[in-house]
Amino acid sequence: RDRTEVGSAPIAQKPRFPSLSTSETVTKVAPWRRISLFTASTSSVLESAMTVTPSDLIDIVIDTAGEGASPGLKGVVGVPEGAGPWPAVVVVHEIFGVDEEMRKQVAHLASMGYLALMPDLYTAGGTRRCLVGTMRAMRSGKGRAYLDIEAARQWLLNRDDGTGAVGILGFCLGGGFALMTAASGFDAAAVNYGMLPVDLEVTLENACPVVG
């Protein structure tokens, strides 16, 4: 489950990070360990620059969830330092749910000046009960997960400290949702190792700007 942070560069042969600063160091590391060490180095560099940490995040119940959304929809919010208004982003977690790594990503985005909200798409039953249904929803383009994502967008729009611009960013499973909802009222979409829709052209017709 080694994963690079948001916005990290592709893995190079000789990454220039403190713990892997020379080719000699790299050659002494077993091949299967190099990616994990690179990830750890990247993570430590990003975390050292974060002004918002995972301990600063706020766990909430998203009160804009309408009929068909997860009852008592949970979410985690990261608020930037200083005075707003800030652009906002709905952050959609990967297949493992709202775990420690995903909370770091919310904190990272808040540190970059985004009002970030990650809805828990597994609120209604936990990972085991919700995972398969959520994956099917992502592929089909309909289901409770989409209502949860829309509830998160509305929650951000209702805040007084937002600019009114709301993007969506997703990882893995969430990356698929970011593509599937790119034409659903968001101002921008960012995809991190997400699954492509079956019919990409139709899905992205009239979509907001997409980066990946």
Image (cartoon, helix red, strand yellow):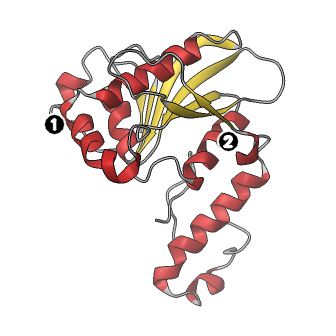
Q: Is residue 110 visible?
A: yes
Quarter of the figure that contains the C terminus:
top left
Callout 1 secondary element: loop
Residues 6 and 134: in front is 134
- Return the x and y of residue 97 as percentages of the image width and height: 45, 48
Callout 2 secondary element: helix
Residue in the image at 35% along x and 45% along y: 173
User: Tag 2: Cα neighbours inside 10 Å, few (<14), some, or many (≥20)?
Assistant: many
Farthest-out residue, right: 82
- Against 157, residue 40 (above or below) is below
Farthest-out residue, bottom: 28
Residue in the image at 59% along x and 82% along y: 26
Residues 77 and 48: in front is 77
Residue in the image at 46% along x and 81% along y: 32
The CA distance from mark 2 to mark 1 is: 32 Å
- In the picture, measured across the screen, residue 100 lies left or right of residue 183, that is right
Q: Is residue 14 visible?
A: no
Residue in the image at 48% along x and 34% along y: 169
Query: Mark number for residue 107?
Result: 2
Q: Earlier in the sequence, mark 2 or mark 1?
A: 2
Give the labeled residue for mark 1: 198
Residues 48 and 64: in front is 64
- Against 173, residue 177 (above or below) is above
- Report if the CB atoms under discs 2 and 1 are less than 8 Å apart: no
- In the picture, measured across the screen, residue 135 lies left or right of residue 99, that is left
Q: Tell me which amino acid carries mark 1.
A: Val
- Return the x and y of residue 190 as percentages of the image width and height: 45, 34
Q: Tell me which amino acid carries mark 2.
A: Ala
